[in-house]
Amino acid sequence: MLKNLWLALLSSFLVCSSFLYAQDQTGTDGTAIKGDTAGPNRFWQATLTGGHYMIALDKITSVSRHKYVLDGSLIVDEVTVDSVGQALARFYFMRPITDAMESNVATQLADQGKELLDKVAKRGGTEVQNMVVKKYPDTTHAKSIEYRLLTQAELTSLYDSVRNSWESGKGRKFSTSPK
């Protein structure tokens, strides 16, 4: 009888703890954050097309998100994670400024340019559209780590993941890579 009681208690504990561990974080819109899972205690990490980033939660000093226009032709939506150390992490999504306009000739030309860039990238064996964009020396930032995301939804999920992890003090893993 004691053995059955012990097994029942152990089973109940395992079931309840798996529910607690599996709880999803929710984003600013109240839905589960896509690509976000529980991670090692005290750390937030991101696995992205361009690499991997990991930081101790107690070393984060700020998390921010902002948009700006770059060179009059691109809208950049950027998330920054500042830390006690010397490196600033920048995660961004870029789109042509013409995307914000009504459908017109400029938008059609931008779309044709994107298609051409994709074709060239495939022929060259590179994923240019995934790479960070820099214009030396203007955008070369000393002591900054940069990652480019391919959609605004991915950037929003990343921001929600790091912000929630930092606020709660619970480690999280964020990934845009297929599992």
Image (spheres, rainbow, N blue to C red):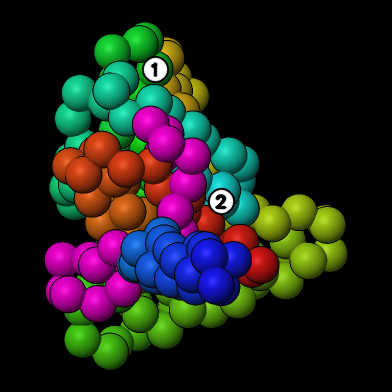
Secondary structure at numbered mark 1: loop
Q: Which residue is mark 2?
A: 48
In the image, 109 versus 140, the foreground residue is 140
**Residue 33 horizontal/vertical position (percent):** 34, 68
In the image, 173 versus 64, the foreground residue is 173
Instruction: Name the residue located 64 percent from the left edge and 68 percent from the top edge.
Output: 178
- Packing grade of label 1 (10 A; few <14, some 14-19, many >=20) is some
**Residue 162 horizontal/vertical position (percent):** 31, 46
113 above or below 94? below
**Residue 107 horizontal/vertical position (percent):** 35, 80
Question: Is 77 placed left or right of 87 in the picture?
Answer: left
Quarter the C terminus occupies: bottom right
The magenta span reads 25-44
Residue 38, by quadrant, is: bottom left
Could you give the CA–CA distance between mark 2 and mark 1, rounded to whole angstroms?
A: 18 Å
Q: Is residue 12 magenta?
A: no
Callout 2 amino acid:
Leu
